[in-house]
Amino acid sequence: MRYAVLVTGPAGAGKSTFSRSFMTHLNMSKRTGHLVNLDPAASSASFEYEPVIDIKDLISVEDVMNEYNYGPNGGLVYCFEYLLENMDWLEEELGGYDDDYLIIDCPGQIELYTHHPFLPTLVQNLQRMGIRTCAVYLIESQFMEDKYKFFSGVLSAMSAMVNLEIPWINIMSKMDLVTSNAEDPSGGARNGLRGRRNIARYLDPDPLLLSFAHGDDRPAPNPRFHALNQAIVHLIEDHPLVSFLPLDLTSPDSLETVISHIDYTMQYGEDEEPKEPHDLDEGDFQDLE
């Protein structure tokens, strides 16, 4: 059985860094993993692990921009439309990997996850090839600094989940930049001071964060947006699809927790046949003496 993890999320969320750490973890665990780059604008120097499959071998944003005078976003969309027309190339590239973990690093343009047909078509092709697929969606902890920005991230994650319809894990990345200690000498408070209880309201989104408490010294929100905020609150309460796993890449335990959730989501290893134990001989008992 082959497994594929789509690493998705907005630009700057830490997708490539997470993919690199994921690869390192698989290597240290004696598991076979391969990096697949689906970002036609990514620089080759940005990869610590060389991708075994790289969309830039088929087409790149730079070539499209030079040939058609497109902008970066138009060039990116053209690249994926070109890939959709040449899915046989991707299938041929993927055909050589059996019983492997494929980590697919995706670009940061949010429209690719929310309403563009590329990723749903890709997922259908992966599943047709017998590749068990899930996705992770990263937003960074800086989103917790602005509750409105945070809920826009929640809604984009929800939209992407509905669009792809595959097993899904949302991740709050860069949690090492959040601290509950105001005197933390590490400078870890770049993304704000947060107590454990406060962080929990964001990891399991609390719609009441959008409400305006009496006595709050912050400027009152525009009353014209009250109905919109109420609609968002009801949507999240009625469809509690989104919650986040915290990811602190400075903590091996944090990364291990996220990867164990990914394994569980895809039922990693459940279809594998048990391995026969090797025959024991006298030398196998020397360490016990």
Image (cartoon, rainbow, N blue to C red):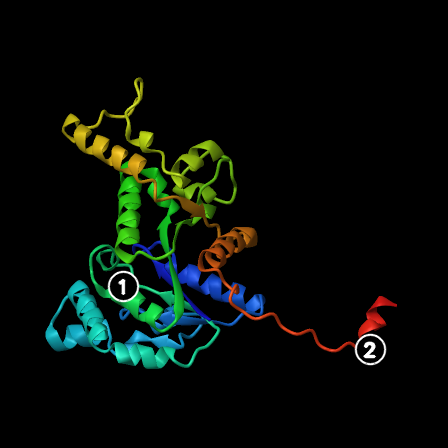
Which residue is under mark 1? 119
- Write down the quadrant of residue 190 in the picture: top left
Q: Quadrant of the C terminus?
A: bottom right
Rendered location of residue 235, percent (x, y):
26, 37
Which circle marks residue 283 in the picture? 2
Rendered location of residue 75, percent (x, y):
17, 69
At x 23% / y 24%, what residue is drawn?
Answer: 220
Mark 1 or mark 2: name the one nearer the start of the chain.
1
Label 2 crowd (10 A; few <14 / some 14-19 / many >=20): few
The amino acid marked with disc number 1 is: Leu
Q: Are marks 1 and 2 in contact (CB under 8 Å)?
A: no
At x 29% / y 57%, what residue is drawn?
Answer: 164
At x 35% / y 80%, what residue is drawn?
Answer: 93
As drawn, is 87 to the left or to the right of 240?
A: left
Residue 264 vertical placement versus 58 (above, below): above
The amino acid marked with disc number 2 is: Gly
Q: Nearer the viewer, residue 136 or 27?
A: 136
Which circle marks residue 179 in the picture? none
Residue 15 vertical placement versus 223 (above, below): below
